[in-house]
Amino acid sequence: MDKKENLKKILESPTYRKAYEDTDFMKRSELRPVRLQLELLKPEMIMNEQKIRSTIVVFGSARVLPRDEAEANLKAVEAELAQHPEDPTLQRKLARAKQLVQQAEYYEAAREFSRIVSTSCQINGDCDYVIVTGGGPGIMEAANRGAFEIGAKSIGLNITLPHEQEPNPYITPELCFQFHYFALRKMHFVMRARALMIFPGGFGTLDELFETLTLIQTQKKSPIPVLLYDQNYWSQLINFDFLAEQGMISRDDLEIFQYVESPQEAWEIIVRFYERANGK
């Protein structure tokens, strides 16, 4: 091998790349602490540049549909079942389609809540109480959509998953982030949060709810309004009173959260909370 060939190999060698430009190097397990720091810093720096001073977090199911889509889906399933009325798979599909029509209320409520908050708080360029979601479909889409429809900013904190999740199309482009680590994503949900609005959901929603309840219970996070939408759903899903009766939590812990039945009620609770906090 002559020196020209060797020089070509040197210039093409991964070891010659600048460390921060070498993606293979950055993905090594030894670099995990650096990646964690970057996932903390990037959204923090950009949100500061965008003057995001505080947020309101909206959690809830990714599986909920807007009303028009849910109704169209139900009609399609009914037509399919009419052709095969004895098909048990289609019968189950019909039951789920009817559920989705009922659950569309949650989508519309999240959308309206976001409109109310964003209209009240994003005035003259101020960025307080900016809506932040997990950036996906369902309730997340509804909340980002409510802000989008009135020209307000909103944030999406997406996460890489085995089945890739695209951001919903209503997030402010400059405020759409993608995370690898759930822990760092959760930190960004909580760091600027002035309230949590939690709609019915599954494992992910429960994980995010209990993370926040624990942080407030252990005083790692100052008390903020934690609002559970639709008491009927939550009281069937989780027996909080039983936890208190068994001494697993204190009675005072039941005051960390409260139930709400409408977007307007939720917003009024948040407003009153901060009026009291500010001595008004």
Image (cartoon, rainbow, N blue to C red):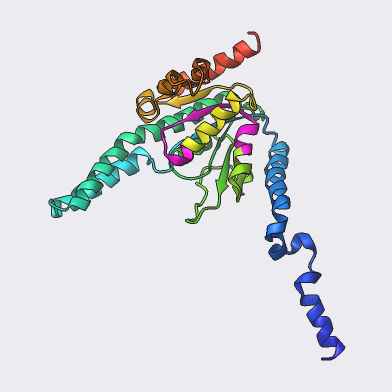
Q: Position of residue 204 (x, y in %)?
A: 48, 41
- Residue 42 vertical placement versus 51 (above, below): below
Residues in magenta, as a range: 187-205
Q: Position of residue 99 (x, y in %)?
A: 29, 38
- Residue 55 vertical placement versus 15 (above, below): above
Tell me if residue 194 is in the magenta stretch.
yes
Rendered-image quadrant of the C terminus: top right
Q: Quadrant of residue 202?
A: top left
Name the residue rendered at 34%, 38% in the picture.
67
Q: Is residue 255 visible?
A: yes
Number of labelled discs? Answer: 0
Rendered-image quadrant of the N terminus: bottom right
Q: Quadrant of residue 234?
A: top left
Name the residue rendered at 14%, 54% in the picture.
84
Q: Position of residue 45 (x, y in %)?
A: 73, 41
For the residue pair 271 and 33, the one nearer the viewer reads as 33
Q: Position of residue 127 (x, y in %)?
A: 65, 30
Tell me if residue 221 is in the magenta stretch.
no
Residue lying furthest top:
280
Residue lying furthest bottom:
1
Residue 218 in the figure: left or right of residue 97: right
Residue 169 in the figure: left or right of residue 9: left
- Residue 111 vertical placement versus 45 (above, below): above
Residue lying furthest right:
3
Residue 20 in the figure: left or right of residue 118: right
Q: Quadrant of residue 4?
A: bottom right
Q: Is residue 118 visible?
A: no
Name the residue rendered at 46%, 20% in the picture.
244
- Residue 132 vertical placement versus 257 (above, below): below
